[in-house]
Image (tube, rainbow, N blue to C red):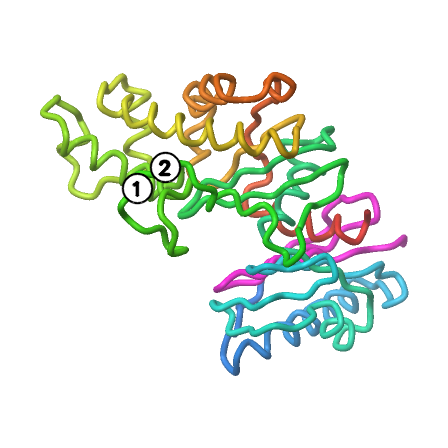
Amino acid sequence: MGKIVFGVDIGGTTVKLGMFDDQGTVLEKWEIPTRTEDHGNLILKDIAQSVEAKIAESGYAREDVLGIGVGAPGPVDAKGNIAGAVNLGWGAFNIPQTLEALAGVPVKAGNDANVAALGEMWKGGGQGCLDVVAVTLGTGVGGGIIVNGSLVSGYSGAGGEIGHMLVEETESESCNCGLRGCLEQYASATGVVRLAKKCLAGSQESSSLRSLDELTCKDVWDAVKAGDAVAAQVAERFGYYLGKGLAAVACVTNPEAFVVGGGVSKAGEILFDYIVPQYRKYAFAGCRNARFLLARLGNDAGIYGAAKLILQ
């Protein structure tokens, strides 16, 4: 029957799991609840039991399992040590050692955003590229850096935290991380709404955005597509901060491609109309021709990347 591998993406409410063959074809996907009670001590036990049940159900033997890859929310170093995950109730411990003892198969672990980046490089928007920076534009801004096909996790597992690079020194409001002027404050979904509200408050120009009771990031991009002048100003500011920020990242990593995902990316390639000109303006000449691509795996990027941790 061949060999199989499991990819696991641990979220705050659900754990996504996938069973793959040794060529990276997904055979089955499923989810289980993330039980955070008892300081999250049940999470890895539930994963081990779910994997064991799936092995038995599918007719494979434990000897057919190459391993389990895990993406977890928090800084995870190259050895699988996590510094802690507040939303899971976890403190510091080694994920592979703990899960290997429960599941009886090899385990590798990484930060969830980094692992998702690996998935996009392998089977998603960055397929065919070995040097990729994945950018996740959601409630916050996440990142994953891949150099020559390998994840850059950094000394303590905090590599790729591009959302917290300084892009605006004059910012007076604090980011959720406690710093001020972080990229996340301008390029996330919440950041786009924040920019829009500031733009509306500082202008009397007519805009379809003014009639909305609960302004969303989608509303802003829909208005951009409809030709709204105020929304276009917001998009210009968004593009300035993100393009300039990614130009700084490129000086360090020199990626072949930036792969952009997350909820904001659902606006489509119109994002690149605002990001790319600013990127080209600020990027070092040797990095200027990086491609900009949309992510393709959506919520499955994590399980693909986790599986790749084992298969690489």
Observer-nearest of 10 and 199? 199
Q: Is residue 39 among the parts visible in the rendering?
A: yes
Mark 1 residue element: loop
| Numbered badge on residue 308 | none
Q: Is residue 56 above or below residue 247?
A: below
The image shows residue 202 at horizontal and vertical percentages of 14, 30
In the picture, residue 209 is in which quadrant?
top left
Q: What residue type is labelled 1?
A: Glu
* Residue at the image position 51 percent from the left and 41 percent from the top: 136
Q: Specify start and end residues of the magenta stretch as a single range.
A: 1-30
* Residue at the image position 32 percent from the left and 51 percent from the top: 174
In the picture, residue 106 is in which quadrant?
bottom right
Residue 80 belongs to the span the image colors magenta? no
| Numbered badge on residue 168 | 2
Q: Which amino acid does label 2 sit on?
A: Glu
Q: Which residue lies furthest to the bottom in this view?
A: 38
Residue 25 belongs to the span the image colors magenta? yes
| Numbered badge on residue 171 | 1
Observer-nearest of 167 and 193? 167
